[in-house]
Image: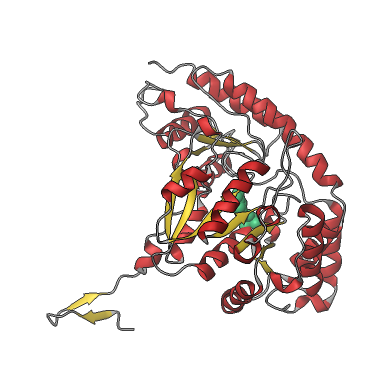
């Protein structure tokens, strides 16, 4: 195949092997550190891993049973309609009413390959080149890449521990420009665990409505909210926003089903139909058997979810206390999801194991090498100085890992 092209001077310059668009994509930092740690573990090193963002519980038995049964039915060896099985879309409609008191219809639902795919679809369908997306930081590492891949521009709005890592309507207003088309919201948040209150969301949603912004709201951690805080869904709260709002959701975090790859997007019918069109040429339907498992999850009881939430809640308190007990480490109590997000900034320029870290990336590397503990540095979330520790792991691992971390950080010289 001829991969040479003529330049204006007539000489031939080789075409880039990888397109410019894709070459710009950063590899997921969360996966990179996890891969390095897992490799060390494979090599026989006793590692403690706080990197991965997935529940450590197995998928509940009744869901697995439904999938096993589905495997044996040859009807499930075939394609399903691109937007998903009718039964699953109906189960999503019923679940959305049950959990959010939001009335939607089947054509407003597209079943996707996980929540991540729903995010990619949403930005692909909404953004034209140059359109801006208001993106509060710390942000989940996939959002800016997904926005850029769709031709959009992430407009990052930094937040800190002083506001509980939450944006306010004023901050959004100050960051918006003529090019702003979309606001990305996620509550509970990955990586901070922040949960917005009804009042905060009302103000933000009303601003979006007034300004004509679209809102993409990621509700994937909706069932992992602690301390009896209220779960609020933006399009239910703000009348009129339904026509310019996409909800992203999925079974991964709620039902310990990260590997099954079932998510969905809910939005106005024209947007969902356009996303379905796109998906029909890219991935077609989600695996039939996985869809059957998701139906069992959504139609089943939430008893297992309650048990998992109780375990996460206990671990949340344990890890936050242990982190705050380490000198120079400060950690807010997260209100949702399963991540602790402490500041390690005090260790910049300290002498740690003979090195002088100037970023959390450096600290992560030192901690990985010296304490055999893996976490994700805040740079991956647009929040240098911070670190994300997933507490979706056993109490014993939390105690072992944070003790090791504390022992190492205690040796820092300032
Ligand atoms: C905030 C957030 N949204 C969406 C997802 C995507 O979940 P999945 O694609 O596994 O359904 C994740 C996974 O880590 C997440 O943290």
Question: Is 17 positioned to the left or the right of 364 in the image?
Answer: left
Comparing 358 with 208, the one in front is 208
Q: How many marks?
A: 0
Quadrant (top left/top right/bottom left/bottom right) for the N terminus = bottom left
User: For the point 35% across and 24% down, which residue is it?
Assistant: 349
Task: Indicate left or right for 139 with 102 as reference.
Answer: left
Q: Is the residue 197 above or below the residue 316 in the image?
A: below
The picture places residue 366, in percent across and down from the top left corner, at 44, 30
Camera-side residue of 110 and 11 = 110
Q: Compared with residue 360, is residue 155 higher up or lower down, i.e. above or below?
A: below
Q: Nearer the viewer, residue 143 or 403?
A: 143
Q: Looking at the image, which residue is at 72% across and 45% down?
A: 231
Q: Quadrant of residue 164?
A: top right
Residue 38 against residue 1 in the figure, above or below: above
Please identify the quarter of the rendering in which residue 260 is found. bottom right
Up the image or down, 403 lies above or below 211; here it is: above
Residue 60 seen in this snapshot: yes
Q: Quadrant of the C terminus?
A: top left
> In the image, what residue occupies the spot 60% across and 28% down?
401
When asked about the image quadrant of residue 8, the answer is bottom left
Question: Can I make out residue 28 in this image?
Answer: no
Say how the picture is coloured.
secondary structure
Find residue 345 and report its horizontal and vertical position in percent.
43, 27
- Image location of residue 127, percent across then percent down: 48, 67
* Image x and y of residue 177, in percent: 40, 56
User: Of all residues shown, which one is farthest toward the front?
Assistant: 210
Task: Please indicate whether residue 248 sits to the left or right of residue 92 in the image.
Answer: left
For this view, does 45 lie left or right of residue 352?
right
Asked whether 31 or 126 is in front, the reply is 126
């Amino acid at each position: 195949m001829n991969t040479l092209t003529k330049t204006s001077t007539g000489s031939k310059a080789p075409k880039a092997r990888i397109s410019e668009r894709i070459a710009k994509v950063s590899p997921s930092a969360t996966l990179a550190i996890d891969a390095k740690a897992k490799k060390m573990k494979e090599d026989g090193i006793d590692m403690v891993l706080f990197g991965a963002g997935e529940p450590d519980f197995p998928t509940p038995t009744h869901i697995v049973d439904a999938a096993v049964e589905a495997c044996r039915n040859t009807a499930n060896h075939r394609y399903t309609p691109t937007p998903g099985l009718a039964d699953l879309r109906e189960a999503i409609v019923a679940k959305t009413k049950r959990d959010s008191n939001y009335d939607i219809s089947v054509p407003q639902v597209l079943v996707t390959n996980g929540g991540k795919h729903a995010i990619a679809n949403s930005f692909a369908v909404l953004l034209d080149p140059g359109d801006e997306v208001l993106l509060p930081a710390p942000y989940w590492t996939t959002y800016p890449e997904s926005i850029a891949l769709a031709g959009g521009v992430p407009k990052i709005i930094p937040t800190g521990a002083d506001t509980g890592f939450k944006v306010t309507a004023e901050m959004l207003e100050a960051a918006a420009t003529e090019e702003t088309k979309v606001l990305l919201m996620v509550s509970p948040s990955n990586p901070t665990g922040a949960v917005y209150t009804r009042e905060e969301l009302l103000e933000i949603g009303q601003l979006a409505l007034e300004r004509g912004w679209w809102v993409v709201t990621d509700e994937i951690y909706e069932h992992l909210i602690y301390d009896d805080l209220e779960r609020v869904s933006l399009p239910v709260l703000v009348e009129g926003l339904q026509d310019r709002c996409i909800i992203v959701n999925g079974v991964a975090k709620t039902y310990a089903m990260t590997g099954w790859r079932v998510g969905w997007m809910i939005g106005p019918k024209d947007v969902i139909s356009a996303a379905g069109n796109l998906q029909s040429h890219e991935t077609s339907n989600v695996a039939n058997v996985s869809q059957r498992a998701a139906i069992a999850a959504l139609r089943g009881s939430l008893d297992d979810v309650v048990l998992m939430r109780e375990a996460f809640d206990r671990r949340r308190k344990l890890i936050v206390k242990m982190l705050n007990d380490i000198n120079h480490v400060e950690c807010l109590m997260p209100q949702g999801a399963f991540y602790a997000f402490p500041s390690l900034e005090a260790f910049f320029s300290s002498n740690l194991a003979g090195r002088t870290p100037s970023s959390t990336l450096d600290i992560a590397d030192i901690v990985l090498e010296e304490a055999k503990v893996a976490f994700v540095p805040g740079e991956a979330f647009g929040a240098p100085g911070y670190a994300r520790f997933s507490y979706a792991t056993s109490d014993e691992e939390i105690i072992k890992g944070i003790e090791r971390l504390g022992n190492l950080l205690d040796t820092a010289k300032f």
